[in-house]
């Protein structure tokens, strides 16, 4: 089993009491932002030193929740500061990108620059991103599917042509081509069962995140059933499993060190910003069924205890965290990569690095010893 660190690049100053949508530029300090990026680079260098398998970034816009407006840009910088660790984004928000061909070109560049360290990840994004870019929510699914068709087609065609609802290209000879042929590994995030079926049909890796364990079990049943219908054989490597993880020398130490950062992340950064944005979206899109796009649970009421009960947060000693991961592995039917969200909120470097070293020294060897098994439909 592999372990990737997954990071949102949250703004490095606690803005509790000032969050909503929009937050306002008066709370932005460029030096805090600069140090936020540099601190994350140091974090990723330590992850490589400790033997983590990869770094994963996401893309968010318009708030201190995440400063990674362009994971492609930041991964290019991180690539220069590292040498062997895998690099992925989860991912490029395809519905809001004006030209998916540009995304295909940038990822091919990054794959060549890193000599094949890239894993290309794609997601639709949370509703707030559509608000920032004035993209109708009703077009999100169709834009994502067409954009991914363009990217895959550009990577694999000698000369690429496409005439669609949103994008049109004629006989494009894309240079550079990806270093990995025919293209880098592709990860796609999904939550709904319909989206999960489409990931299965595309033959790419499914990424599950922000869904309680019982919900992931149902989601993976859908994934396996859809794959079996088209004759696709799945292994653990076809599933990436996201969880917030934190370890300490003792259970009490782990809980003490991460509690305030977990609560700030869920109750403030996630809930206050997204709730305000959703209210604005609802006013602008009265035709949308908001029960379909609301968060999978109430972020504002989340506590460390309720997050652990749902399986979303795994916190404890290296041994107890390993046992909890394997319990979820068995419950959902297996996964090949843990996407560990370790740095939460404004967690300081000393707390984070102590956790990372414990993971690298005591948890990671156990995860690497877990052998793949073939999943059954």
Image (cartoon, rainbow, N blue to C red):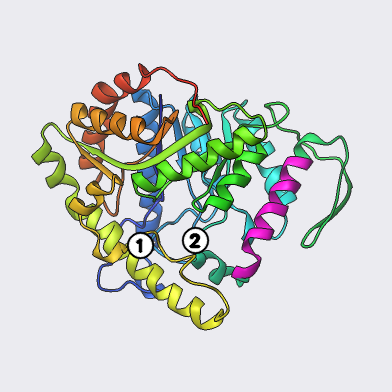
Q: Where is residue 317 in the image (x, y as percent from the top left)?
A: 17, 31
What is the magenta range? 137-153
- The disc placed on residue 198 is none
Residue at 47% over, 45% down: 219
Residue 210 drawn above or below residue 179: below
Report the side of 193 relative to 256 (left or right).
Answer: right
Q: Distance between the residues labelled 2 and 1?
A: 11 Å
Report the side of 367 relative to 158 (left or right).
Answer: left
In which quadrant of the rendered view does residue 358 lie?
top left
Which quarter of the rendering shows the N terminus? top left
| Disc 2 to disc 1: CB gap under 8 Å | no
Q: Element under label 2?
A: loop
- The disc placed on residue 126 is 2
Principal SS element in the magenta part? helix
Residue at 73% over, 28% down: 182
Residue 208 drawn above or below residue 299: above
Q: Where is residue 170 in the image (x, y as percent from the top left)?
A: 90, 50
- The disc placed on residue 270 is 1
Report the side of 140 relative to 189 (left or right).
Answer: right
Closer to the camera in the image, 210 or 233 = 233
Q: Position of residue 275 (x, y in %)?
A: 38, 72
């Amino acid at each position: 089993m592999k372990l990737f660190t997954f990071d949102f690049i949250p703004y490095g100053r606690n803005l509790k009491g000032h969050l909503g949508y929009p937050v306002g530029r008066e709370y932005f300090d460029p030096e805090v932002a600069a140090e936020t990026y540099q601190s994350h680079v140091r974090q990723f260098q330590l992850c490589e030193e400790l033997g983590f398998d990869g770094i994963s970034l996401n893309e968010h816009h318009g708030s201190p929740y995440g400063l990674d407006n362009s994971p492609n840009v930041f991964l290019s910088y991180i690539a220069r500061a590292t040498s062997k660790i895998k690099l992925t984004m989860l991912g490029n928000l395809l519905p809001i990108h004006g030209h998916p061909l540009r995304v295909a070109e940038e990822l091919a560049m990054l794959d060549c620059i890193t000599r094949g360290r890239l894993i290309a990840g794609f997601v639709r994004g949370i509703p707030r991103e559509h608000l920032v870019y004035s993209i109708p929510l009703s077009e999100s699914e169709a834009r994502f599917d067409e954009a991914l068709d363009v990217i895959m087609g550009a990577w694999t065609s000698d000369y690429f042509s496409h005439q669609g609802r949103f994008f049109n290209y004629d006989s494009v000879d894309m240079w550079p081509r990806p270093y990995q042929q025919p293209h880098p590994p592709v990860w796609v995030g999904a939550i709904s069962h319909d989206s999960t079926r489409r990931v299965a049909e595309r033959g790419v890796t499914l990424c599950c995140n922000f869904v309680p364990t019982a919900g992931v079990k149902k989601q993976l049943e859908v994934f396996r059933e859809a794959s079996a219908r088209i004759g696709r054989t799945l292994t653990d490597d076809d599933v990436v499993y996201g969880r917030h993880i934190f370890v300490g020398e003792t259970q009490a130490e782990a809980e003490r060190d991460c509690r305030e950062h977990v609560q700030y992340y869920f109750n403030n950064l996630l809930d206050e910003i997204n709730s305000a944005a959703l209210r604005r979206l609802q006013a602008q899109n009265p035709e949308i069924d908001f029960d379909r796009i609301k968060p999978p649970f109430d972020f504002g009421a989340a506590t460390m205890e309720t997050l652990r009960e749902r399986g979303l947060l795994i916190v404890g000693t290296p041994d107890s965290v390993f046992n909890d991961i394997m319990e979820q592995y068995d419950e959902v039917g297996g996964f090949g990569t843990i996407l560990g969200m370790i740095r939460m909120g404004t967690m300081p470097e000393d707390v984070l690095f102590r956790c990372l070293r414990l993971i690298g020294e005591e948890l990671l060897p156990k995860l690497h010893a877990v052998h793949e098994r073939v999943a059954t439909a």
